[in-house]
Amino acid sequence: MRLSRVPTGRIAQLARAAFARFPSRGALAAAAWVRATDRAPDEDLLLALREGLNHPSEAVRFECALCLQDEDVLLMAVEGSDAARGAEARRVLAAMSSARLLARMESYGDKAFALDVLKRLPTQTTPGALRALFSVSSRVEGGLAEALHSWARTRPFVEWPPEERRLWAEWARVRLGQLSSTDALRFLSWAAASNAAPLPEARAFMSAVVETLSREPASLRAERFQDTAFSCFLSLADEEHARPLRAWAREEGCAAPLLEALMSLPSRSRRSDAEARGQCARLLMDIWEGADLGRLVTPLAKAVRAWNGSSQEEAFLGAVWQRFQRQPEERSALLTAFAPWRGALWERQRADEPDPVVCFQTWWPVDDPALFPERVEALVRDAPPEDLSRRLDPVWTAVEARVDAWPRATSLAVSYAAAALSGALRQGHEALVPEAERFLSGFQNLMDRVRAAPASVREERYSRDFLADIEVDARLMREHLERLREQEEEAREAELRRRVDESRRRDLERQARQRQDEAESRQRDLEQEARQRQDEAESRQRDLEQEARQRQDEAESRRRDLECQAGQRQDEAESRRRDLERQARQRRDDAEREAEALRRVAASLQRAPEPPRAAPALLSPQGPAHPLDQEVCFPEARLRTLVDYARLVKTLGENSTDALALFEAQGLSPSDWALEANSWGTLMSRRQDLALRFSALFLGHWA
């Protein structure tokens, strides 16, 4: 500090001279020259500084270490007892981003340690430096918030590497939420300072702001709402942050400043006008959500009246109008809170809903009662006469509900409706007569209630009620109805006379028609009787002709039956003759085949004996089986059934040369065969069915 009052050029000159003249003080002179010039030392000065690192004096070693940025010596000074040297060593090592210094700070560093480091620590540092700082922040009171913010704000948050931004976000979640809301808002303003889209890590700072504001008392929280940094929070708030905003807006003392900050957000936000207006409108509707709207309406109405952002009104109007349409039960509160925009909302209602009756029914229960006459006048003015009755029906309902609390305003509204009804009725629109009678029937009750009810404070602009004006229209309607009744009575009498005359004329016509009908009826009866007699004669003629045809048909049928029976008998005789001839031929053929077979057997027996040969295989019938095939006719014989006899005969016919072998295979001698063949021939001559089946088997296919 003493040297700082001397020009650095003079210090450098004296240090150079002292270095040359006093070698024992060379290290100090070299250190003075380097610190005065802030330039790299020459070789001789550098050598002196290096030798000074081993000097017996701790002060000399420290000065040389500062110039050479010797980490070992500086770390020894950090651990030394001299606080000033330790602080200077920490600052120099911080500028060097010494990893060893940061490790010691992370391990046991206190607030003073961290503050010294932050004074010279570059923001272009490593994640290890941030971890060390955040470690100290978690241990010390206040969390180094002010020093960390002063150090970090020189570098925009968006320029930090992603890993270091994540470390900042983690620190904000763990530590920043435990600090004051001022610190949280200050860091949020730094983290969201970019005009680009907010970074994901900025949400951690948003959460910290919510946590700190929720912890503070309502009076202090209301002051924070007026902070410029709170506008940054509002511009980034989403549905998650809308819940605490909704609760704060319903707190006494917090509602007004919060809503004022929200309404002024478009002019204070860094985002574009369109984005800011959309964000403000969305937050406004999010805050409106929920119960206990009564605590929100009054401060919001005050904020809306104080706001003069006419160029940004469209975005708010759109949000309020959507809410007005979706939530009918909130319409009265919406119109009260946003009273300056009541006219614009009414125009939107009329633009979106072409039916004026629907518009009126939507608005009169929630609108300002003082505006009731204007709404009625707009409804009935220039109304088509054919639609007037439909429009007046909700007016009478509204009058019934409003007359006791707002007698003068209601009577003015009734005067507008009565004038429209009276004018349309006198123009000849008779369809409105029931509506006029309904009005006149309740008019006396309306007069009594208007006169009995005290005028409202807000009705002072009306100096009187409007019953006299209504009485004029009521009198005109009564006179018109009386004229209509007189005309109806005259028309009814004329109609009665016309009906009597018409009835007499119809009676005379009916009597004439009756006499004519009787004459025509007698003529029709005579004609019908003549037709009946003619029909009976024709019917008898048809019956006789039909009976004759029937007898002729029966005779013809008998003749055909006799001819048919004669033909059938002739066919049966011819069929028997053909069957007998076929049977005779068949027997003759069978006898010839048997004789031929016997001759072959006899011839074979007369031939010289041959060496024994294997018996030929018996054939089997391939056609469908018949019950006669297996009938046992000769139980004691070898050929007991018809199929056994036919098989042997068929096999002999196919293999006549092997007859003896075949007989031996069947256990027959030639004499046995002749005896059994003769027995079968005798049997078949007696039984025609066996003979026919034998022929069918013999002529069939065998395998």
Image (tube, helix red, strand yellow):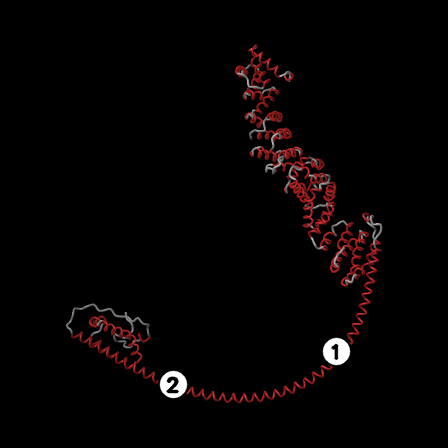
Residue 252 seen from this side:
yes
Disc 1 marks which residue? 506
Nearer the observer, 626 or 267: 267
Give SS at disc 1. Answer: helix
Question: Where's the C terminus, which quadrant?
Answer: bottom left
Q: Position of residue 643 (x, y in %)?
A: 28, 74
Left or right placement of residue 370 versus residue 215 in this view: right
Question: Where's the N terminus, which quadrant?
Answer: top right
Give SS at disc 2. Answer: helix
Q: Quadrant of residue 83?
A: top right
Which residue is at a point 58% across and 34% down the rendered structure image?
165
Which residue is at a point 73% across and 53% down the rendered structure image?
360
Q: Quadrant of residue 166?
A: top right
Dot 2 or dot 1, earlier in sequence:
1
- In the rendered image, the residue lying farthest to the left is 608
Nearer the observer, 615 or 212: 212
Q: Residues within 10 Å of mark 1 (few under 14, many from 20)?
A: few
Q: Quadrant of residue 316?
A: top right
Q: Position of residue 625 (x, y in %)?
A: 32, 73
Q: Position of residue 133 (x, y in %)?
A: 59, 29
Residue 683 seen from this side:
no
Disc 2 marks which residue? 567
The CA span between labels 2 and 1 is: 85 Å
Left or right placement of residue 460 versus residue 695 in this view: right
Q: Nearer the viewer, mark 2 or mark 1?
A: 1
In the rendered image, the vertical position of residue 200 relative to residue 690, given as above or below? above
- The amino acid sitting under disc 2 is Gly
